Image (cartoon, rainbow, N blue to C red):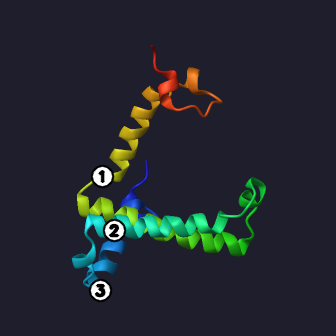
Amino acid sequence: MTDDSIRPDSLENLRARINHFVAEREWDQFHTPKNLAMAMIVEAAEVVEHFQWDSPAESAALTDERKTEVGHELADTFVYLLRIAEVCGIDLIAAANAKIDLNAKKYPADKARGSNAKYTAYQEQ
């Protein structure tokens, strides 16, 4: 097990860097859950825009330039997601693990393997 406090790429370090960035600019006043959620959706739409008219094959074959552009939009979306969690006091890692546990029950591997059906298709009648 590694010590995340010394890893420059840890989620905790990224959260601290974002919080410092926001504090330096006194942007906390604007970072309400509503505003952050709206901003995140705008950025997510900008991710979609990069793939809007691509075929499935084209969307999977990104040039280095497109990877950079899509990466910037994904980063914007990710930063807003982290800010929403921060402002709402939600431990995103715990929430994601709880959701995966819930989804494991809703989508049992032996029934859902290779299928894209909604979880209601796997519920016992």
> Dot 2, crowdedness within 10 Å: few (<14), some or many (≥20)?
many
Secondary structure at numbered mark 1 = loop
Secondary structure at numbered mark 3 = loop
Compared to residue 6, the image places residue 117 above or below, namely: above
Q: Is residue 29 left or right of residue 16?
A: left
N-term-proximal mark, 3 vs 2:
3
N-term-proximal mark, 3 vs 1:
3
Q: Residue furthest bottom?
A: 25
Judging depth in this view, the residue of 118 and 73 nearest the camera is 118
The residue pinned by badge 1 equals: 91
The residue pinned by badge 2 equals: 36
Q: Position of residue 73 (x, y in %)?
A: 54, 70
Q: Residue at x 64, y 68 (%)?
A: 50
Judging depth in this view, the residue of 71 and 123 nearest the camera is 123
Within the image, what quadrant is residue 102 found in?
top left
Amino acid type of disc 3? Arg
- Where, quadrant-wise, is the C terminus in this rendering? top left
Q: Position of residue 86 (x, y in %)?
A: 28, 62
Q: Residue at x 52, y 66 (%)?
A: 45
